[in-house]
Image (cartoon, rainbow, N blue to C red):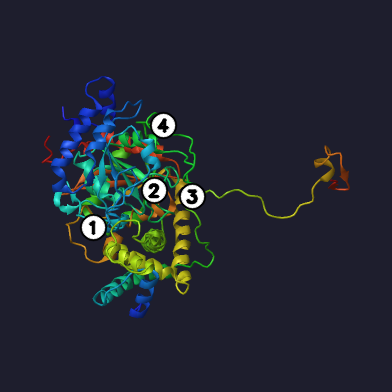
Amino acid sequence: MKLTNLSIKELLKGYKNNTFSPSEVTKAYLKKAKENNQKIGAYINITEDKAVEDSKSKFHSFGGVPMAIKDNIHVANVNTTCASKLLKNHKAIFNATVIKRLINCPVLGKTNMDEFAMGSSNETSAFYPVKNPWDLKKVSGGSSGGSAAAVAANLASFALGSDTGGSIRQPAAFCGVVGLRPTYGLVSRYGLVAVAPSMDQIGPLTKTVEDSAYVLSNLAGFDEKDAMTASPKTLDYTKSLKEDIKNVKIGLPKQYFTDYTNNEVRQAVNKAIRTLEKLGAKMVELDLSHTPYSVSAYTLLCAAEASSSLARLNGTSCKNTKIKGDYSKQCVNSRTEGFGIEVKRRILLGTHILNSTNYAEYYIRAQKVRTLVQRDFQRAFHSCDIILGPTTPTTAFPLNSKHDPLTMYLHDSYTTPASLAGLPAMSIPCGYDSNGLPIGLQLIAPHFKEQDILNVGHAFQLDTDYHKRKITNDEE
Amino acid sequence: MKITAKQLNEIASLSMLNIKQEEIDEYIKELDQVLTYADNLKKLDLDDVKPAKHCLFEERITREDKVVQLRSKKSLHNDINLKDTFIED
């Protein structure tokens, strides 16, 4: 039995029956992570001693499941680098709320990411890019590329990522795993290094939809340390997981099925639609007319918020300041040396549009468009229960192939609308292209209706085996 | 051009960043490209649209902020120190 191939459900069952122990499973994952990390680059830091120690602790219902954590989420006494030179020596002094809630799960390590979660290919990491486990010449997607690759290559049982404009869903689609962005406010952001606080959300990347339900059940809920957290009614998503999706109304926005989407992606999504119809779901045509404006609005708002969020980082507390001088000079030098090009680009863009001369023309206009995107969804959910479409317009693209930022931003065309509206959205594998690269199917639900997308995703996975396909060179 | 070298240097200064001379053209080109693309938002009629404040649809339900006449006798009937509609200290 390959311990690293097992789902969370299978691991918990094995622990209960004493078939194997958390220590054995953790060691198996550590061995595999150490052997494969140089090839894939999924981890920035493998925390072997901590993982072994964590696996010895006693746990109750949900625990002993080895996890990987995106390197912008604080784990006490472990470095939080955000894949940036600026924070390469920054040690976290407290656990993020999500880590506290999963305190019985051994932390295998901190996963690679786009620097400060800015990017869609995981090539902006200051350390090394993450390679797609399905094809090492392709990107993993981003910004949670390390988390997605770690789960896809069985280097972690599950991983946590963060999603601002698609940073969980897009790499999940590229790497053939399940990536869930929860409703804004369902999961505490306390201990997450902020990029765009009005959109950031922590969520799980897992092997199956059912695993996603397990992790989300443990993450969700009010946290007094994050004023934006709500207290939803259902918190055990596994108990409420249904296989029956008869008469569920699924909306198909015409804007998600244009020629902009690669033909093979469209074919796979259409096949998934037929599968769901066979299972009893009803399809409804939708018009989300402001979808084409989402990327512009998102880019402006994200840059504005990022420039503000990162203003606090001056290098003085990061132990990597080389140049001595007066305080402000030191700040400028630290930031100039410490930030990568994409981060600087977004800071400059954000500062520019928040300038009093440009504020109304760019920032306020983008916020107004955000209102329109939200209204689109509000209207749409009067006629359907969930919305379906491709997660990305293409499958994973080659490393170093996209040189201008706009082309990269446009890759998030289908993920940014849900982010602007704060909606829960999930990417699940729904096929493979002719090169064997995974294709992602995106499901979007109304606020706090995670259960609905989990049910549809679970029913889909019970009827298909896209999530079971193994990477060819995946050897124990 | 949406942005000039002078503006870029001002923004960099506000952002606490140094931009090398040889980087200026590249930054201008890239920012210009993004800002030009963002011009597609100008196609929309946004005059009557309010900017989003929050990404959840639910608004906090609050009553209209206006002065109302207290139905004083009813609301204060347990208070023994009444003088007209005021409470005597």
Q: Position of residue A20 (x, y in %)?
A: 22, 24
Q: Secondary structure at mark 2?
A: strand
Q: Is residue A271 above or below residue A346?
A: above
Do discs 2 and 1 belong to a common subunit?
yes
Q: Position of residue A267 (x, y in %)?
A: 23, 49
Residue at 37% x, 77% y is B7
Q: Which label was assigned to residue A381?
A: none
**Cα distance in 3D space between marks 3 and 1:** 34 Å
Q: Residue furthest top?
A: A17
Horizontally, is A240 left or right of A68 in the view? right
Kindly identify which residue carries mark 1. A126
Task: State which chain disc 1 sits on.
Answer: A
Task: State which chain disc 4 sits on.
Answer: A
Q: Is residue A134 at all visible to an observer of this figure?
A: no
Q: Secondary structure at mark 1?
A: loop
- Residue type highlighted by circle 4: Asp
- Residue type highlighted by circle 2: Gln
Kindly identify which residue carries mark 4. A236
Residue at 26% x, 32% y is A53
Residue at 46% x, 74% y is A357
Kindly identify which residue carries mark 3. B56
**Cα distance in 3D space between marks 2 and 1:** 23 Å
Task: Please tell me which residue lies in front, B37 or A300.
Answer: A300
Quadrant in the rendering for residue A289: bottom left
Q: Residues within 10 Å of mark 3 (few under 14, many from 20)?
A: some
Q: In which quadrant will I find the C terminus of chain A?
A: top left
Kindly identify which residue carries mark 2. A201
Could you tell which of marks 2 and 1 lies nearer the N-terminus?
1
